[in-house]
Image (cartoon, rainbow, N blue to C red):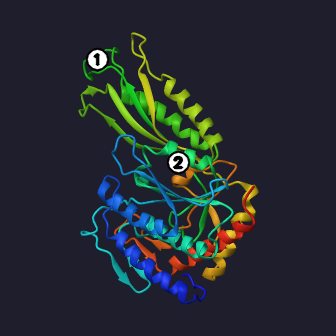
Amino acid sequence: MITPAPWGAHKAALLDKSLFFLKKIVSVDSSPKNIPGVLKVQQLLIKELEQLGFAINSYPHENREYAPLLIAKYGDERKPVLSLVMHADTVLENNKVYPSKLEGDWFYGPGVIDNKGGIVVALMSLKLFLKNNPNPNFQIHLVCVPNEEVGSLGFHEHLKAQGAKSKVIIGFEPAVEKNIIHSRHGNRWYDIEVKGIEAHSGRCNGEELNAAHEFSFKLQELLKIKDELEGVKINIGSVRSEADAYNVVCGLVRAKLDLRFINNEVRDQAHEKIVSILNKSFTKNINNQEAKTVYKIADDCPAFSHVDKYNEFTQKLMTAINTTEGGAIQAGYSGGASDVNYMFHPECFAIDGLGAVGEGMHTREEKIYIPSLITRSSALSDFLEVLSTQFPD
C-alpha cells in the first residue's frame, strides 16, 4: 500500500476538511436517474469552486432525463485550456441500504472511489495549486458529468467540443491498482434485428426462413473478426426471439453486439467487416427469399489512444506521484471507457486514473484508501506546477 511522504499542518488540515466533504457527498444518493441527488452533489461542489473563484456554467440535458452537465471555468480565456473531468453519479443507489463506514485508513461507501473520491482529489489539488498560483498560464475547466455510469447519454457533443478546445485533459476515474491510464478501448454497440418467415416447424415445406439459423451463421463470421484484427474484442451480450416454443420456426431475432477496439482506425476496419457480414445472406427458402437484417448503432464511444509525443509529460506526472507515495506506479492501458474517450484528440495530452486509490468499485465493498486523497492531490498539484513552466505545445 501507499507509503505517503510526510505532509505539513496545512495539508493535514486540508485532508480533514476534504474527508468531511467526501463523507457528505457519499451520503447523497446520486444514481444517474436521481436528478435531485446528482444536483445536490453538484451544488456542494459548486459551492467549493465558487470560493476558489470559478465561474459556473451548466448545460441542461437535451430531454431533461438527467441533471445538467457542469463546466466550471477559472483563468484568462485567452490562455490554453486544461480540463479536469469527473462525474457526480454512482452505480449503487441507496446509501440507507448501503451505509458508509470508516475503518482505520479505509472509508466505505457507494461511489466512494467511482467517482466521489475523484471529485475530492481534483478539488484538493486545485486548492493546493491555486494557493500559490492564482494566475496560472493556462485556463482550468472542471467538467462534472451527471450520468457517466449510463454512458453520458445526451452530452457526447458537449464533451467532444470541450475536448477540442483542451490542450490537457485529466480524468479522475479511480486509480487502477495505483497505476494511471494513458489509453482506453473505445466501444461501439450494435442493435441487430434479423427477420425471417415464421412457420409450423413440422408442417413447413421450405417456405420458411429461420431467423435464428440466419443469425447463428452470421455470429460465426462475426466472432472471426477478433482474430483478424489486433486490439478488437467482440461480445454478444443478448440474443432474444419473440417465439418461445419448440415447434415454431423463429421469425425474428434481436441481438446486442459489443465491439471494443484499441484505436479508431481499427474500429473503422471492424465496422466494415461487421456491416459486410450483416448485409450478407446465409439462408434462403424455396422461393429464393432471404432473411433481412437491419442494425443501428446504440452507442459510439471513440478510443482514447496513447500519444508518444507526450511521453515526457506522462513521465513527469508519474514522477510526481512516485515522490508523494514512495512507490513505483506505471502508466498503462485500461479496457473500459470513460468520459476522457469522448474528449480525447491526438493533439492533446490526455491521462486518466488520477482519482484516489481504492478497491471494490461498483460493489457493496467499495472503499477508498484515505491517505491517497492527499498523496494524489499533492502529486497533481506538483504536476500543475510543472505545467506552469512547460505547457504542451
Locate the N terminus by quadrant: bottom right
User: Rounded to the nearest whole Å, what is the CA distance between mark 1 and mark 2?
Assistant: 53 Å
Res 345 visible: yes
Res 337 visible: no
Residue 206: % across, % down: 35, 15
Locate the C terminus by quadrant: bottom right
In front of the other: 212 or 106:
106
Crowd tier of the residue under label 1, counting other residues whose Cα lies within 10 Å: few below 14, some 14–19, many 20 or above? few
The residue that mark 2 highlights is 159
> For residue 308, what is the image quadrant?
bottom right
Q: Is residue 73 above or below residue 215?
A: below
In front of the other: 192 or 17:
17
SS at badge 2 = helix
Q: Is residue 207 above or below residue 261?
A: above
- Amino acid on which the number 2 mark rests in the picture: Leu
The residue that mark 1 highlights is 204
Crowd tier of the residue under label 2, counting other residues whose Cα lies within 10 Å: few below 14, some 14–19, many 20 or above? many
- The residue at 43%/17% (across/down) is 290
Q: Earlier in the sequence, mark 1 or mark 2?
A: 2
Residue 145: % across, % down: 45, 54
- The residue at 44%/30% (across/down) is 295
> For residue 364, what is the image quadrant?
bottom left
Q: Is residue 184 above or below residue 100?
A: above
- Amino acid on which the number 1 mark rests in the picture: Cys
Residue 348: % across, % down: 67, 53
Residue 362: % across, % down: 39, 63
The label shown at residue 366 is none
> For residue 182, what is the image quadrant?
bottom right
- The residue at 54%/86% (across/down) is 10
